[in-house]
Image (cartoon, rainbow, N blue to C red):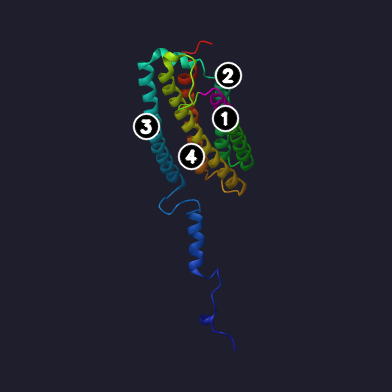
Amino acid sequence: MALRPAQRKRTDKEDPLAESEVTLEALHPRELRHHFDTPEQQLESSLLGMWIFLLTEVMFFGGMFGGYTVYRNLYPDAFASTSQYMNVTLGGINTAVLICSSLTMAMAVHSAQLGKNRAIILFLLLTLFLGCVFLGIKYVEYHEKWVDHHIPGPHFQYADARYFHQAQILFFLYFAMTGLHALHMIVGAGLIIALIIMAARHRFSAEWYTPVEMIGLYWHFVDIIWIFLFPLLYLIGHTK
């Protein structure tokens, strides 16, 4: 017996709920969170949150820079003496490496804005490689300090007995500041790996690339911190 028209099952095309879901998906893409109206609004909110986070990072590193400034003013001769043991060559190479990594990260963000997925992956891989080069060079530098017994503690050794205790302060600040910077580099490298995986899965488009831009800001911030660390720890007072 044929079903009456009223009893016929609705198809997806005839179902008003299905039609509303399709319309909602078109107006509210998957990447757009429900509490935002437009992708632009979501990006602006993300940028505000990232800048607030970076401000807390500035205060975090600012305390260490402040401590460095105080002790350098208290013991200028001792700090000038210990500056001679900083490897300016390796520090300079690392500075160039990070500047290049900032360029490749900027190119990754630009590629994301254009929706060029392969270019995103390429530039992120280059950025990750340069970050690993930086960490590798930093390991070599730390190993030098270990061999020379310049790590603060019971086995610390320093040629000039006049500045023995003050030299420990400088080397403590050196390891604390560069070590925390290296930790931020490791975190950044992990985030870049996550971005590469997302890009490989075609998660980014010209309409949505917020994670790439946010991690790009973080990476540039870490690079800027090193730009301040290099002259303070390596160049000021160095005469060799």
Residue at figure coordinates x 56%, y 84% from the top left: 3
Compared with 32, 81 (above or below) is: above
Mark number for residue 214? Answer: 4
Whether residue 236 is visible: no
Q: Amino acid at mark 1?
A: Tyr
Mark closer to the observer (3, 1): 1
Q: CA distance from mark 3 to mark 1?
A: 27 Å
Q: Amino acid at mark 3?
A: Met
Give the residue at mark 1: 139
* Label located before the other in sequence (3 or 4): 3
* Label located before the other in sequence (3 or 1): 3
Secondary structure found at label 4: helix
Q: CA distance from mark 3 to mark 4?
A: 19 Å
Membership of 141 in magenta stretch: yes
Mark number for residue 59? Answer: 3
Report the front residue among 12 and 36: 36
Magenta span: 139-149
Left or right of residue 104: residue 167 = left
Q: CA distance from mark 2 to mark 4?
A: 32 Å
In the image, residue 46 lies at what x, y percent? 43, 43
Report the front residue among 106 and 192: 192
* Label located before the other in sequence (2 or 4): 2
Mark number for residue 89? Answer: 2
Q: Amino acid at mark 2?
A: Thr
Secondary structure found at label 2: helix
* Label located before the other in sequence (3 or 2): 3
Mark 3 nearby-residue class (10 Å; few <14, some 14–19, many ≥20) = few
- Give the quarter of the figure containing the C terminus: top right
